[in-house]
Amino acid sequence: MDIKEILEKCDHTLLRVDCRSEEIRELCDQAMKYNCASVCIPPCHVAGAKRYVGDRLKICTVIGFPNGYMTSAAKAFEAADAVRNGADEIDMVINLSMVKDGCWNEVAKDIAAVRSATEGKLLKVIIECCLLTEEEKVQLCRIVSDSGAEYIKTSTGFSKGGATREDVALMRRNCPPRVKVKAAGGISTLQDAEDFIALGAERLGTSRIVKLAIAQEQEG
């Protein structure tokens, strides 16, 4: 697969807790140059990034990140604030405490609260696969599919593991075609990216593919 095709599926990501505005602008410049799907950045940088890029690039941000254990009302407020600040796409983290307690209706309501606050925007639901059993992953595929979210996402990249080929295949197998899969966390090579796309991922959360493109450009 051509690297340009891969880049079009990348959410060029910078979620480091101490990232500076200058770094966010550089991230945006890179994403626009290489035609990435979006930049994924912390909520505090959304308004500045939107002013910087205008309509030239989609701005994605994270909600309830990275632990997901905020109240649903807090997540909904955070999501609405991000939309007001110019976010085009929202990646929310589910409440894993509710999952482990088997409170599936509450998990669904938690997602619904953010969906209501983000109508008209793309919603991706992070289920943090590395902390789940296979049965929990399958159940969450059903809940996310019923929620109205456009994407289900493997990982925050801030827990004990990132995307795996097995998880992407499981998610694709257990979600209807209208629900897309985003792989994130630990995607470091073009082979990783190609494998995840071949298994059904339509978005990749990573900064490393752009870095590989820059390196290729410098070598060539």
Image (cartoon, rainbow, N blue to C red):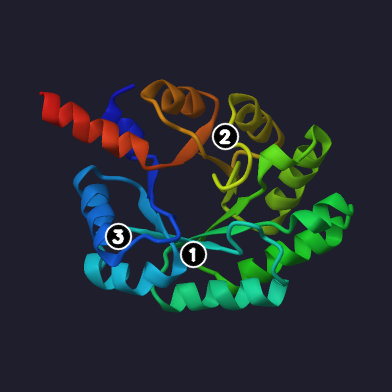
Please identify the quadrant where the C terminus is shown.
Answer: top left
Q: Secondary structure at mark 3?
A: helix
Q: Are marks 3 and 1 in contact (CB under 8 Å)?
A: no
Camera-nearest residue between 215 and 90: 215
How far from the left and from the top, in percent, is residue 181?
Answer: 56, 40
Nearer the observer, disc 2 or disc 1? Answer: 2
Q: Label 1: few (<14), some or many (≥20) within 10 Å? A: some
Amino acid carrying mark 1 in the image: Lys
C-alpha gap between disc 3 and disc 1: 21 Å
Pointer 2: what residue?
163
Camera-nearest residue between 17 and 178: 17
Pointer 3: what residue?
24
Camera-nearest residue between 138 and 131: 131
C-alpha gap between disc 2 and disc 1: 24 Å
Quadrant of res 149: bottom right
Quadrant of res 56: bottom left
Please tell me which residue is depicted at 60% across the width and 41% down the height of the picture.
154
Q: Secondary structure at mark 2?
A: loop
Q: Is residue 71 visible?
A: yes
Q: Secondary structure at mark 1?
A: loop
Pointer 1: what residue?
121
- The numbered mark, 3 or 1, whose residue comes first in the sequence reads 3
- The numbered mark, 2 or 1, whose residue comes first in the sequence reads 1
C-alpha gap between disc 3 and disc 2: 24 Å
Q: Label 3: few (<14), some or many (≥20) within 10 Å? A: many
Measured along the vertical axis of the image, is residue 127 above or below residue 134?
A: below
Please identify the quadrant where the N terminus is shown.
Answer: top left
Q: Are marks 2 and 1 in contact (CB under 8 Å)?
A: no
